[in-house]
Amino acid sequence: MYRTHTCGELRLANAGEIVTLAGWVQRTRKMGGMTFVDVRDRYGITQICFEEQPSEGQTDACNTLFEQANKLGREYVIQVTGTVNERSNKNKNLPTGDIEIIASKLVVLNESVTPPFTIEDQSDGGDDLRMKYRYLDLRRTPVRSNLELRHKMTMEVRRYLDSLGFLEIETPMLIGSTPEGARDFVVPSRMNPGQFYALPQSPQTLKQLLMVSGMDRYFQIVKCFRDEDLRADRQPEFTQIDCEMSFVTQEDILQTFEGMAKHLFKELRGIELKEAFPRMTWADAMKYYGSDKPDTRFGMKFVELKDLFAQAPGFSVFDDAKYIGGICATGQAVYTRKQIDQLTDFVKRPQIGAKGMVYARVQDDGSVKSSVDKFYDQNVLSALKEKMNAQPGDLILILSGDDAMKTRKQLCELRLEMGSRMGLRDKNQFSLLWVIDFPMFEWSEEEGRLMATHHPFTHPKDEDIPLLDTDPAAVRADAYDMVCNGVEVGGGSIRIHDPELQDKMFRILGFTEERAQEQFGFLMNAFKYGAPPHGGLAYGLDRWVSLFAGLDSIRDCIAFPKNNSGRDVMLDAPACLEQKQLDELYLSLKPVEN
Amino acid sequence: MYRTHTCGELRLANAGEIVTLAGWVQRTRKMGGMTFVDVRDRYGITQICFEEQPSEGQTDACNTLFEQANKLGREYVIQVTGTVNERSNKNKNLPTGDIEIIASKLVVLNESVTPPFTIEDQSDGGDDLRMKYRYLDLRRTPVRSNLELRHKMTMEVRRYLDSLGFLEIETPMLIGSTPEGARDFVVPSRMNPGQFYALPQSPQTLKQLLMVSGMDRYFQIVKCFRDEDLRADRQPEFTQIDCEMSFVTQEDILQTFEGMAKHLFKELRGIELKEAFPRMTWADAMKYYGSDKPDTRFGMKFVELKDLFAQAPGFSVFDDAKYIGGICATGQAVYTRKQIDQLTDFVKRPQIGAKGMVYARVQDDGSVKSSVDKFYDQNVLSALKEKMNAQPGDLILILSGDDAMKTRKQLCELRLEMGSRMGLRDKNQFSLLWVIDFPMFEWSEEEGRLMATHHPFTHPKDEDIPLLDTDPAAVRADAYDMVCNGVEVGGGSIRIHDPELQDKMFRILGFTEERAQEQFGFLMNAFKYGAPPHGGLAYGLDRWVSLFAGLDSIRDCIAFPKNNSGRDVMLDAPACLEQKQLDELYLSLKPVEN
C-alpha cells in the first residue's frame, strides 16, 4: 500500500499516529536544523518535517534521512512515513495546518526535471506553456477545481434527471452528414470506400427518433462536433446535456429544466433560487436589451427616443435615423469628457460599428447638459430626462442608426460595457430567465432565403400557423432559451410531430422534396409510424460549468482543450497520416493553394 | 397537459378518478357492445373501454366516441380521458390489470401507417427489418428494457465510483493517430489541410496524463472507436468504463473493481456475491481451460495425458502428439455413436480445426470402452480413468496435437460445447474470477517480433524485470482481466512510471527512438515531470450490459447499432459527400480496384 492517508486528510485528532503519505513535493525550506517539505496531492497539502539531529530514541538513520530530504526537488514524487505531530506554528489557511509529520522514512518514487512553471495558484507560465504542459497546469488548484466542479455538475444533472424518470441513452457518434447548418467533421469509412460518416453536431434527429420509439424521457451528456472557424471560446468538440420529452407542452419543459437549474445552483453553489424564472419574449429582449440573451443582473433598459426627437427636427443624425435608443447610467454624470470619449471610441470599434454616441448629463439642479445642446432646447432635453426616468447625477447615453436591429446590438454592447464599469456584473450574482417566442425563421442574405432560426423541426406557435402561408417571416416558434448573466446556457423547442406540417416547413425553407428526403428521409419516414408530441432542450455543459466556476473562458473547464486553430498542442494533433493509412481509405491529398 | 398518469401507473386505489392517458394503440378488440383498446407507453399498458350504449347519465356523444375508437389503427398515438373503473375480468399478468378506463374523450394525436412488424415481445420481423425500423423495434419491451438496464448500470457505476472519490473527466475525441495496434478512424482537419485527427481507440494515454496531473482517481464512461473488420459482436464504436488510479498496487485495483462488480450485481440483479473472486494465473487458465477467459460456471478441467499414453506406445496419433488433453463429462457415457460423431464433426470444423477426437466411456462395471481399445490394454485405460477421476457412467473426451496451445484451444471449444449440452451454462448463474499474471509479450508471426500483450505501458512483474534482458518472452506482467461466464468483461494493468523502464520496453518492442518519440513523445515527456505509480482498468460496457441482460449479442443493448459492414441501415450511413465538402478538406477519392 502506497499511503495510509491522503495529503488533505490529517487533523489534530490524528496526532501520535504513524502514517504514510504519497504525493508531489510542493516546496522545501531549510530552517536551522530542520527541513520542511510540503507534499501535495489532489486532496491537499501536508507539511513534513525532517530533523537534522536524531531525537531521543532515534538512531543515526535520521541524518541520512535529513540528507535525502535536502536533495528533493520540486515536483518529485515521494512516499513519506512518520508520526503525526501537533504543530507549534499552526497554519490557519490550511485544513491540515494544525499538524505536521515527523518523518521516519522517505522513498523517492519518481524524480522530476524542473517544470517550465511553478505549480502555484497564481503561476501558469502563460497560455502557450499552459497548453503544451497541460498535465502540469492541471496540478494547479484553480484548474483542478474546475474539473472537480464539472464532475459534480454532471453527477447532479444525472441524479436530477434520473429521479424524474429520464433514461440516459447513448446515440451513435458515427452518423450521416447533413450539409444544412454548420460544417460536419467527417470520417472516411474504409469498409465502405468513398463513403464517409459524420460526427454529430448534436443528436437532434436521433433523440427525436427515440421519442418515436416511445422512450418518453431521454437525456445524454454527450460530445458534439462542429467544424467552424473558431471564434474565441468555441471548441471543435464540446459537450451538451441533451434532453427530450414526449407528451409535453412548452410549459412542461420549462418547468422541468428550470427545476434542474435550481437543483444545480442549490447543490453546487448553495444558492436557493426560489422565484420562478422570469420569461421574456424574444421581441421584448431585443427591444429592451438589444440581445436574445440579455444580462439581467442590472436594469439600464433601452428607451426608444425616435418619437421624442422627431418633435424637434434639426439634428440631421437623429432626423435621418430609423432608430434612436438611450440608456440611463445611474449616478454616472460625473463621467469626464475623457471617459465619454473612451466610450465613444468603444462603440465606434469595428466589432461594434456605431457611427457616434450622444450623451446627456443630468445636473444637480435637474437641468440637462448634452452633446447635442445646440440642436435641442431645454424643453426637449427635459422631455428626454422624463422619458429616460433620469435623476440628477445620471448619465444618458444615446445611439442612433438606420437599421434598428444593428443599432440595438450596438446599444447592447454599450449597456454591457457600462454595466461592467459600474460593477453591476458580479460573477457571484446569478440572474436567470427564459427568452421565449423566438422567430421561426430568419432571412439569410448569403443564401437568399429564409433559414430556420433553431432547426427545421421546430414547431411554430399554434396561433401563428396560418401565417406560414401569408407572412412566414412573422411566425413565432415554440422555442426557448435559458439565459443566465447574458449567456445562453441552454435552448430548445417543441418539435413538429405532424408529417404534413413538417413537409410545409421544408418547402418554406426551400428544400426540394428530393433533398428533404435525402437528408431527413429516415426521420420523415419514422414520423409515419405514430410520432408523439415531443420537445426538448440542450444545455451547453462547458458554458454551464464556466458560469458556475466564474471563468472567462470555457477552456479552463476542459481537461485537454484545443487552441483557436483546432490544434491540441500537447498531443500535437492533428498530424499527417502515413501513406498506408491514406491508401487503405482510398484517399489522396490535394495540394493547398496559397 | 397531455396526461395525468402514465400507462403503467393506475391501480385499484385510483378507481373513480378521472384521468388522462397518452400513448400508442397496442391493439383493439370489439366484444359485443364494447371496444377495448390497449394503450401503451414506456411504463406499461392500460386497457381503455369504449361503450356502444350510453350508460346512465351520459349522452349520445358516447356513440360518436365508440365509432372513433373503432377507427383506431395499430400504433396510432392517442390521448384518452375517462374514469378509472375496477375490472370484472382482472388480468393478473399486468400491473394495471385490476382496472380499466371508461373513456369519455378520445383525441388522435397522430396516425400510423401499418408497421412492418407488430410491436410484441416475440415479433421482430427479422434482423434486417429490425435494424431498418429500429425506432419501432425499440418500442418492444425486451429491447427497451435493455436500454433501461444500461441506464441503471451507468448510474450505479457512477454512484459507486463517485463515492470512492473518482472524478469523471472527459478526454478529447479528436486526438492523434497511433498506427500501433488496431486501425484508427481518422478525421480530416479542414483548418489544418492534409492533417488528420484520430478518434480514440481508448483514452489510455490521456488517462495516464491525468495521473501525471495528479487527478488521482479518474473514470469516464466513454465512446471508443476501432476500425476493424467486424467479427460477430463487434461494433466500430463501443463504450468503455475507463478507470485509472494513482499510488496503487495491483491489489488495490482488484479490490476496488471487484467491489464495483459486486455493487452492480447487488443493485441490478439482486445478487450478493459474498466471496472474494478467485484469482487464476494466465498459465493455469491456459492449462486447465485452454482460454484466458475460462467459463468457470462448471468444472470439466483439462487433464494432461501425454505422460500416461507415452507409457504404452502404439497409437501413432498420440505417440506423435506434443500435447494430449482430456475432459471428463460426468454421466455422459450414454452418448450414442451418432452423438459422438456430431462432437467429432464439431471439433473438426475449420473454425476449430482438430484432426479427430478420442473418446472413452466408463461402463457401469467400471471397465472402460474407448475408440482406441485396439491400441491400449485395459491397464492403460484404467489408468486413464483414474487420472481423469472418472466414475462409471462418465464420458472421457480426448484431443491431441503437435501444438499444445492450439490443441488446448480446441479442447476449450469442446469443453464449452459439452457444458452447453449438459446445461451447465445457465445465463442466470454468474461465475466471476480474475485472471492475473498475463505474459508481457506475445510473438507476432505477422510482424516477426514481440508485441505487447496488453500495451507498451504495462508494468512487468517486479520479480521478472531481470528476465527482460535474458528471456523477455518469459516475462509476466502486472496485468489482469475480470472474467465472467467465459467473457472478458474488463481488463487492465499497472503502468510503467519509470522513464528508463519505459525506454527499455519500447526497445524490446522494436520501436526506434524516433518512432517512440513520434508516437508517444508527449507521454514520455510528461513522465519526466514526476509521474506517480499508477494503474487502471477498463470495462466493456456493452458486454457488461449484455451479460446482465442475458443477451447473446451486444447489439441489443445499443440503441442504434451498426451492422457487420459498419453501416447504420436506418440512417443509411456512411454515405458519399458532396464535392464541395471534399474540396474544403483538400481530399480526393481514389478509384477502388476490384
Image (cartoon, coloured by chain):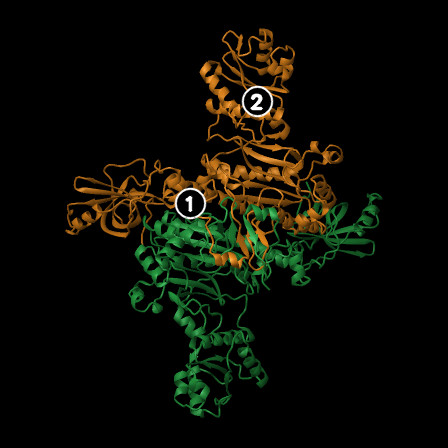
Chain colours: A green, B orange
Against B376, residue A373 (above or below) is: below
The secondary element bearing badge 1 is classed as: loop
Question: Which residue type does callout 2 highlight?
Answer: Lys
Q: Which residue sits at x=50%, y=31%?
A: B430
Answer with left or right where residue A421 lies relative to residue A451. right
Estimate the x, y position of residue B318 in percent, counting from the top left. 61, 15
Q: CA distance from mark 1 to mark 2?
A: 44 Å
Residue B293: percent from left, percent from top: 56, 31
**A196 versus B418 height, above or below:** below
Disc nearest the viewer among 1 and 2: 1
Q: Which chain is home to disc 1?
A: B
B102 and B195: which one is in front? Answer: B195
Chain of residue at mark 2: B
Residue B172 visible, this orientation:
no
Give the left or right position of residue B70, taking residue A338 as reference: left
The front one of B541 and B62 is B541
Task: Kindly check if marks 1 and 2 are in contact, taking CB atoms under 8 A apart as contact.
Answer: no
Q: Is residue B568 left or right of residue A83?
A: left
- Circle 2 crowding by C-alpha within 10 Å: few under 14, some 14–19, many from 20: many
The answer to whether one can see residue B199 in this image is: yes
Q: Please, what is the three-letter code of the amino acid marked with disc 1?
A: Val
Relative to A518, does residue A287 appear above or below in the rendering?
Answer: below
The residue identified by callout 1 is: B569
Q: Position of residue A153 (x, y in %)?
A: 52, 54
The location of residue A113, given as percent across then percent down, is 75, 53
Q: What label does residue B301 carry, if any?
A: 2
